[in-house]
Amino acid sequence: MAGTWGRISTAVSPFPNPHYCVVYMRTGISMAEIPKEEYVLKCTSGCAGCSSTLCLRYILKAAGPETVLVMPACCTSVIQGAYPNTAMNVPVYNIAFASAAACASGISASYRSLGKKTNIIVYAGDGGTVDIGLQALSGAFERGTDFLYICYDNEAYGNTGMQRSGSTPLGALTTTTPAGKIHAKKDIDSIVAAHSPPYMASACSAYPLDLFKKVRKALEVRGPTFIHVLAPCPPGWRFPSDQTIEVGKLAVKTGMWILWEREYGKLKISAPSRAAVKKPEPLATYFSAQGRFKGIDPAVAEQLRNEVRRNIQRFVREEEQSCDQ
């Protein structure tokens, strides 16, 4: 089988949880090697151009059939189809909005007590992660639960009509911020990082191979892991359904969304973001591609530009410090 394997480490983790460990990690994967098996079937009830469905398709290809999906209230709980039918080809546990990570903790403990290495994956939207489910997420990470938590972030409560969430960016129009959101996007990644997980990363639906690799890597690390995926939403962000990939790429190319991964506290900026951190494209191209930024106040737009510059500087600085360690 083609590809390369990462370094084997048996060193004690620098983090306090003794259950974390590093195992073999395969790194060289091409699109041709992605499994042909489908775990998201063709009968979803997702909107045209839905990037959550695209994300989940590659996530489950990376995870394989030995997977249990825990899903709180979110767009994907509707996308899976109307009972008794389902588009999901793996077991799914639908749970209350606030309880996904707590439920996953119990499922993980049960499987591990039986000696099973089944992948336990929470797949939750930003509302169920940065807002309503934050307490359960924090508790599961503090306990060292062996699971992967994935937040697919469409930056609003998409399932109930695109109300603003804590993840909605400054200036964006939603049904509850018709003049534009006046608060900054909550930094959920820093909140998760404060729990010192062994692995966490960001991804975007426009870069499925990058997402696939990061899911594989996260599932090969024992302990709580986290992936934050930007998932552009055509009806909610107000762009044509055939532009989902282009809008996602613009988010990365402008530096509005930086792709990275952090292993045991050491950060590495991912390949698709390398060019962006050196010379990002104008943020105006990202704004103009979406109706949710229509008529954005120039002062607010400048605030976002400054935020992008600060974030780029912060990530570059952290990566340099990681290389020095």
Image (tube, grey):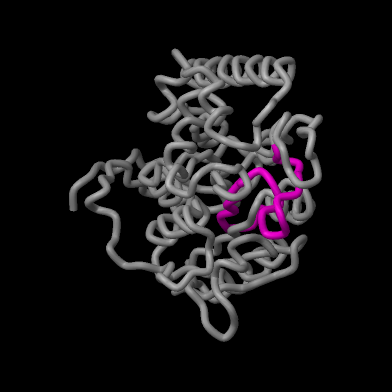
For the point 67% across and 59% down, which residue is it?
Answer: 159
Q: Residue furthest left?
A: 1
User: Do we see residue 225 in this rendering?
Assistant: no
Q: Residue furthest bottom?
A: 84
User: Do we see residue 20 in this rendering?
Assistant: yes
**Image: 54 above or below 300:** below
Q: Residue 288 versus residue 157: which sits nearer the camera?
A: 288
For the point 54% across and 46% down, which residue is it?
Answer: 231
Q: Position of residue 215 (x, y in %)?
A: 45, 50
> Residue 154: within the magenta?
yes
> Residue 308: within the magenta?
no
Q: Quadrant of residue 158?
A: bottom right
**Image: 12 above or below 86:** above
Q: Quadrant of residue 245?
A: top left
For the point 75% across and 62% down, which residue is it?
Answer: 97
Q: Position of residue 288 (x, y in %)?
A: 55, 28
| Relative horizontal placement of residue 313, taking residue 51 as reference (left or right) | right
Q: Position of residue 256 (x, y in %)?
A: 57, 27
Q: Residue furthest front?
A: 295
Q: How many marks?
A: 0
| Relative horizontal placement of residue 205, taking residue 106 as reference (left or right) | left
For the point 63% across and 48% down, which residue is it?
Answer: 236
Q: Position of residue 263 (x, y in %)?
A: 51, 36
Which stretch did the figure color magenta? 143-168
